Structure formats: structure tokens, C-alpha cells
Image (spheres, rainbow, N blue to C red):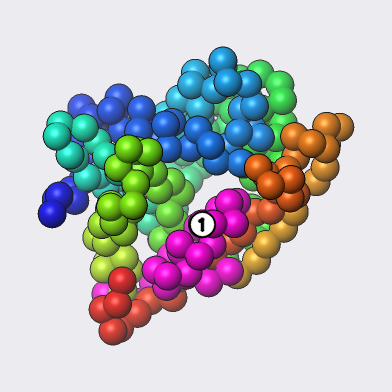
Amino acid sequence: MPTVRRLSPLERAGALETVVAAFAADPLVRWWFPDDTTYPDLASRFFGVLLDTRLEGGEVWAVEIDGTVAAVSMWVPPGGNLIGPDVAGARYNDVVAELPAPSAERIAATDEVIDELLPTEPHWYLGVLATRPDHRNAGLGTLVCAPVFAAADRAGVAIALETAPTANVAYYTRRGFSVLHEAELASDADEDENADADGEPLTVRIMLRSPRADGVR
């Protein structure tokens, strides 16, 4: 069984590569970055600032297999990023503002919806969970979340996340989450782009995991 551990800043490049590869088919992320040619660069810039602020003031856990970062989870603790929510937010906003159209506008629109729906009580926030495509279906996503799941349970604190793919709802439900809110993203000029692979409108779901005393993961 691979070992889960905190990510070292020296492993940033490998972790970022894993995250970018993991989200290459995610319908929401690809709505933000629809061009295959520019996706690697733009997604690296976007996820890079999330990774950096979590390394500095949150938590990042990883699983390594054969020298490769195979899975990553990025977290913001209850109360916000420890470098200061305003500092982390400013860094994020600076990166998003520099992204070309339509990426910046679509990310901002998504963030506006999410910010209205996230719970207001203190909670751990699972901002990113990523497994390399060639290591999926091996339980690594569950493994890389286990330390924070356990910490949240000990402290009696909930965990929140947002997700768009319908398949992810079942995945997280099996791990103790339930859908708290959901919202369709507003249509833009190109309605075909504002849909998932099945042609359904893009829907953001906020999911919440209440603390558990039974040790079930």
C-alpha cells in the first residue's frame, strides 16, 4: 500500500503535472480552458497558484508511486488560509485576471456562484483532489484524503467541496458527502460550450461531509 504524506515544496512540479493531467477531461475546467493547445499552460497557471497558496498556508497531501506524484489533495483549513485569506485571495485574483478570454470571465462567474453556496460555518475545504489518469481506480483518492478526514472527525468539523461532473457525486457520496446546493452556470453566447460531454448544462454542486464518529471512510 502506498504511503500518504505531506507534499514537499520540492515536488511542486510533479504535483502540478498530475493535477493538470487529472483535470484534462473535467467539463468545468475545460469550459474555462476550452482550447487543447493552450490548456496545459493556462491550467498550470491556474492550478499553480492554488497549489502554492495551499503549500504555504493550507495542507497538501500526496501519494507517490515509482517516483511519481500519483495523487494530490489540496486543502484550506477552517478559518481560511494561514497566510491570510486576503493574501491568498489577492494572489489568486491576480493570476485569474491575467488569463486570456474567455478563461478569466468564466472562472470569475463560477467563483461568484460557488462563493454564494459554500457553508458559512468553519469547515475544511477540499479545493483540489487529483489522481493521475494512469493511476485511477486504485483507491488513491481516498488514501490521499484520509489524513484530513481523520483530523476533521477528531475536531468535529465538516468538509466542503465543489464539483461539476455528475459521476463525481456518486464518488463523494460513497465517502460520506451529500449534496448541499447545486446551481447551473449561466449560459453564455456559445451555449454548446456551456455543457458537459453529454450535452447537459454545466452544474456546480456543493457537497458537505459531516464529521463522523464511527471511523467509516
Residue at 56% x, 15% y is 37
> Considering depth in this image, is 104 or 14 the residue closer to the camera?
14
Is residue 54 something that shows in the picture? Answer: no
Residue at 66% x, 35% y is 31
Quadrant of the image occupied by residue 9: top left
For the image shown, how many numbered marks are present on the structure?
1
Quadrant of the image occupied by residue 27: top right
Residue at 14% x, 34% y is 66
Is residue 213 something that shows in the picture? Answer: yes
95 displayed left or right of 20: right
Name the spot of residue 71 as percent of width and height, x first.
30, 43
Residue at 66% x, 18% y is 100
Whether residue 172 appears in magenta in the rendering, the answer is yes
* Amino acid type at image mark 1: Asn
Residue interval drawn in magenta = 154-179
Quadrant position of the C terminus in the picture: bottom left
> Considering depth in this image, is 160 or 176 the residue closer to the camera?
176
Quadrant position of the N terminus in the picture: bottom left
164 displayed left or right of 82: right
Name the spot of residue 41 as percent of width and height, x first.
49, 18
Residue under pointer 1: 168
